[in-house]
Image (cartoon, helix red, strand yellow):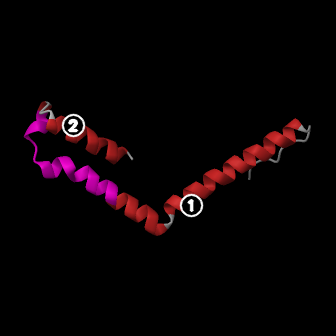
Amino acid sequence: MYTLGLGILLCLLKYLEIGPVAAWSWWWVLSPFAVTLLWWAWADSTGYTKRKAMEKMDQRKQERIDRNKEAMGMRPRRPR
């Protein structure tokens, strides 16, 4: 996501002709978008995105269970 933000910023600087970016080739200005595309393709093909989403859901689930146990007066399980 950082490379996407960088690409948008560089496009804006190039379009508005601000700073040294105005003299750069459009290939250099658009290169962060290519890096972002490669990152997303790799993350999706290796399952990285899905794995991170599942880890986040598991963490939220465990926090909810711990909150409910604490509300009932039971001690929550310690993280492994």
Work out whether mark 1 precedes mark 2 in sequence or the reverse, and give the earlier one: 2
The residue at the far top in this view is 18
Magenta-colored stretch includes residue 25: yes
Q: Which residue is mark 2?
A: 12
Residue 60: x and y in percent read 68, 47
Q: Secondary structure at mark 1?
A: helix
The residue at the far left in this view is 23
Q: Amino acid at mark 1?
A: Arg
Predominant SS of the magenta segment: helix
Give the number of the mark in front: 1 or 2. 2
Q: CA distance from mark 1 to mark 2?
A: 34 Å
- 13 sits to left or right of 59: left
Residue 54: x and y in percent read 61, 58
Q: How many marks?
A: 2
- Magenta stretch, residue numbers: 20-37
Q: Which residue is mark 1?
A: 51
- 42 sits to left or right of 58: left
53 or 77, nearer to the observer: 53
Give me the residue at 83% from left, 41% from top.
68
Q: Secondary structure at mark 2?
A: helix
Residue 50: x and y in percent read 54, 61
Give me the residue at 33% from left, 47% from top.
4
Q: Amino acid at mark 2?
A: Leu
Magenta-colored stretch includes residue 8: no
- 12 sits to left or right of 75: left
Residue 21: x and y in percent read 14, 38
